[in-house]
Structure formats: C-alpha cells, structure tokens
Amino acid sequence: MDVSALGMALKRVKLKKNKEVNDRSAPMMKAGLEKKDLDQYYKDVQDTYVESWEPLLTAKGLTFRTAYVPMQKKEAEAMVKAYEAHEKLSEEEKKGKHYAKFYAMLLKDPVFSKMQETLQKQIDECLNLFKCDKVFVKGSSRSAKDAVIDLQNMTADFESRCQNVKKQKGEGGKCDLNSGVVSLLGAGKDAMSGTSAQYFLQLFVRSERIYQDMRLALQMKDFKSGWAIREWIDVDIGNTTTSAAATIVVILTFQK
C-alpha cells in the first residue's frame, strides 16, 4: 500500500475539538468536584511529577540526566492565557508567518519573554553539561506530544523519511503502510527534541495537555509546576523492518 498521500493529508488535517477530553492521563477537571477530592487528586498527580521520581532513578543510573526550571504562578497564568488566545486563532492564523506574528505578540508580555529567556539559559547549560546535540523539554506532569502534529518540520521530516524508503527500494519502490507508520512515528519522536526555548514554548502554547496541567496546578493553594529539561538520546526507529506495533511501544516509552 502506497502511503505517499499521507504527507498531503497531514497538511490538510483538522482535528475536531471534543467537548470532553478522552485522555486517560489527563487531569480531573470535572465540574462540581469537591475541593477535598480535588486536593487529593492533585496530590496524587504531584507524585507522578518527574521531579518526584527522576532523582530516585538517576541515583541508580536508570534514566536520562535531567535539570529543572521551577515555574512561578504568574508564568503558568501566562501559559494558560497564551493557549486560550491560540485557540481563538483561525486555522490559517496558526501557520507560518501568521503564527510568527502571534508569538511575537506573546513575547510583548514581560512575564512570557522572561520565561523564554530563563528556559533558554538552562537549555544552553544542559547542552553543555550533557554533551548532547539536543534536549527534550516537558512539563512537570506531561509532555506536549499532542501538539507535534501542528509542526511544519514534523510534516517535512515525515515526507523525507518516506522518500528515503522509496529510494532504498529502488525504481518503482513504494513506502508501504508499515514503513509509513514507522516514518510518521519517527518524525513525531524527533519533533519532541530541540535546542531552542522558543521552539519548545511554541509547542507548549499549542498543547492541550500542558494547558490542562497548568490549570490544575493554578487551582491549588500551594502552586507547584515547572519545566524538566532531559538529556536527548536518539533511538533509531528508522529500520522499516520494525513492526509498527513495536515502534509505537518505543514512542510511548520515551514521550511521557
């Protein structure tokens, strides 16, 4: 099966917004939830924060090196406002030069611009300390993996991977379904890495997962949230003989 049209489909796709989020890992935002239940739920969520478990695994050499950028409450509020403003944009305004103009507007907020400056400084320090070419940045609770589909560089990477598959197969070669899925997941995986605070913040502003986590944290009396900068170690999933199912397991393992 030739999946060459999948690249074009990615450019045209418009995800339908559900009134109710069906993300099982999502924070509990249920209307009418009693305060005591919400407090207990948030405590349970905090136990899953990377700050809670990473030091324990790092001490045993079982996970990637990580640094943290604690977030102030006003920065979380800025992220919430940025996401809500982004959601009001038209599909056209979310692309290219239109999006660049929108992000430039966000940077006029001194809180947002300072957050980018602080994050960039820490990323630069991690790149030097970890001796790696790229890093992976996530929120304390979850990553912005739901937003990578909106990135032009992901679509371009996917199409490039499919073209490489065709070239490897020689004249008349096609990118079959399994190869297409591996290419798509590989492009999505790589889109989660970078060297720029601006790149990651643009990703976070698009992410409903990050938005939900910020909203939940802001509801609590004792605010706690931040960014985790993790060492990036590339996992080669470009082998088209790898089954799509096995590849999905790899992606889910590394994109928490």
Image (spheres, helix red, strand yellow):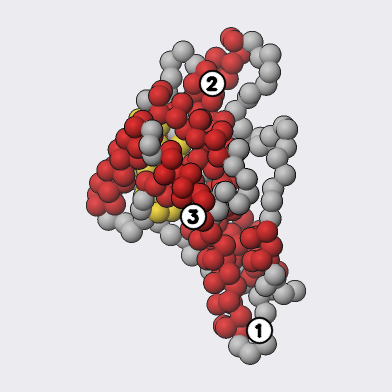
Residue depicted at 49% across the width and 55% down the height? 97
Q: Nearer the viewer, residue 26 or 76?
A: 76
Residue depicted at 46% across the width and 26% down the height? 77
Q: Which residue is mark 3?
A: 97
Q: Is residue 199 above or below residue 174?
A: above
Residue 45 lies left or right of residue 104; in this view the side is right
The answer to whether residue 43 shows anywhere in this view is: no
Q: Which residue is mark 2?
A: 42
The kind of secondary structure element at disc 3 is: helix
- Identity of the amino acid at label 1? Gly
Q: Which residue is mark 1?
A: 173
Rendering coords of residue 233 (x, y %): 40, 56
Residue depicted at 73% across the width and 33% down the height? 19
Q: Is residue 99 above or below residue 140?
A: below
Q: CA distance from mark 2 to mark 1?
A: 52 Å
Q: Is residue 202 above or below residue 56?
A: below
Residue 18's label in the rendered image is none
**Quadrant hosting residue 29:** top right
Q: Residue furthest right?
A: 1
- Identity of the amino acid at label 3? Lys
